[in-house]
Image (cartoon, rainbow, N blue to C red):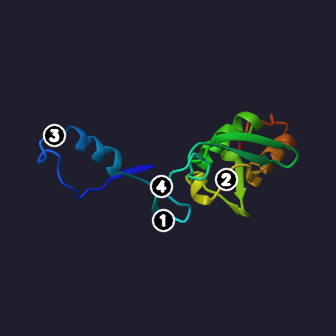
Amino acid sequence: MMKLRSKRFSRSSSKLGNNGSKGEKDAKNNGEIKWELRPGGMLVQKRESNNNQSSGEGLIAVRVSTVSQWHHISIDSTSTFGELKLILSLVTNLDPGEQRLLFKGKEREDSEFLHMVGVRDKDKVLMLEDPATKEMKLLGMARGQPINNTCCTIAV
């Protein structure tokens, strides 16, 4: 969230003889405008509401579907897909480089923000294993190498 100060055009309370005590406090409280960045990229003035979910702040629950399982992950809505991959790596034992995350039918890059793409509370994200690493694991099994040793493959 960005905070920008707006100038207020009013009489200074120092001219009124109050030494600026009350007038400066009012200007500080009323003079700040809070801004938010919408998923489309538009910068707008933040609405005053008690629901943090609608303004793009706070924790959201994301349902992540693998081929055979569902995982419910709580994550900050301003996180990136790369951070989501790190959390999923703890749950699924797949490295972040081996994961492919799809949201609304498109593969998402690690640097994309969840709230900028439009991920909201209880939305579904599909996680697939990278086909290249899957193939390397299968080739490793055929050669008799350990399955989880994808970083140290030997070219024959």
Pointer 4 residue: 46
* Neighbours of disc 4 within 10 Å: few (<14), some (14-19), many (20+): some
State the image coordinates of residue 143 (x, y, percent, origin top left).
84, 41
Q: Amino acid at mark 2?
A: Arg
Question: Up-down: is 16 above or below 117?
Answer: above
- Contact (CB < 8 A) between labels 1 and 2? no
Between 78 and 132, the residue placed more toward the observer is: 78
Identify the mark nearer the N-term, 4 or 3.
3
**Mark 2 or mark 4: whose residue is earlier in sequence:** 4
Q: Nearer the viewer, mark 2 or mark 4?
A: 4
**Tag of residue 18:** 3
Asked if residue 151 can be seen in this view, the reply is no
91 left or right, relative to 45: right
The relative height of residue 83 versus residue 8 in the rendered view (above or below) is: above
Return the x and y of residue 6 as percentages of the image width and height. 30, 56
Q: The disc labelled 3 sits on which kind of residue?
A: Asn
- Residue corresponding to mark 1: 42
Residue type (three-letter) at the residue carrying disc 1: Met
Badge 3 density bin: few <14, some 14–19, many ≥20, Cα 10 Å: few
Q: CA distance from mark 3 to mark 1?
A: 41 Å
Q: Examine the image and state in which quarter residue 10 appears.
A: bottom left
The answer to the question of whether label 4 and label 3 lie on touching residues, with beta carbons closer than 8 A, is no
Kindly state the secondary structure of the residue where label 4 is placed.
loop
Check disc 2 and report the residue beneath it: 120
